[in-house]
Amino acid sequence: QVQLVESGGGLVQRGGSLLLSCAASESRSSIYVMGWYRQAPGKQLELVASITTGDSLNYSDSVKGRFTISRDNAKNTVYLQMNSLKPEDTAVYYCNAREQAFGRSWDYWGQGTQVTVSS
């Protein structure tokens, strides 16, 4: 079981920046993608950004040009740099890791970190 621990959330004003970190308890070659999801009150969980083992990046349209996902393999850590934050970015942000083996895949989730952007 891989444990994911997020940090870096908080309260920031419109236009500000935050850096989220997600530290994995171990490195596994079978984990082929890691990402950040968010869930705002009353809304569905949505993918914010993801990065594959081949460094392929994917962003939701709402954060393109403002957020950057990256990782440090030596630290088993994935980051989400969030710039030009807007009140609509307010949500609980969850780190995700997807593992694949024997034709199956499954997800690991962090506990979530609150991001609040004031206007």
Image: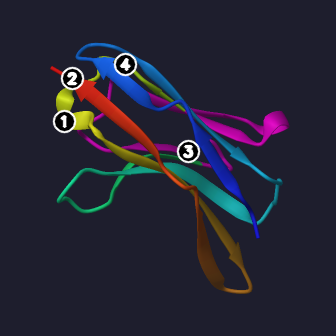
Say whether marks 1 and 4 touch (CB < 8 Å): no
Which badge, 3 or 2, comes first in the chain's sequence?
3
Residue annotated with mark 3: 56
State the CA–CA distance, disc 1 to disc 4: 13 Å
Residue 76 occupies quadrant? top right
Which badge, 2 or 4, comes first in the chain's sequence?
4
Q: Which residues are magenta?
A: 52-79
Q: Amino acid at mark 3?
A: Ser
Q: Is residue 47 left or right of residue 20?
A: left
Element type at marker 3?
loop
Residue annotated with mark 1: 88
Q: Is residue 107 left or right of residue 32?
A: left
> Looking at the image, what colour scheme do you see?
rainbow
Residue annotated with mark 2: 118
Which badge, 3 or 4, comes first in the chain's sequence?
3
Q: Is residue 9 left or right of residue 103?
A: left
* Residue ID at (37%, 47%): 92
State the CA–CA distance, disc 3 to disc 2: 32 Å
State the CA–CA distance, disc 3 to disc 4: 21 Å
Say whether marks 3 and 4 touch (CB < 8 Å): no
State the CA–CA distance, disc 3 to disc 1: 26 Å
**Residue 75 placed where, x, y %?**
81, 36
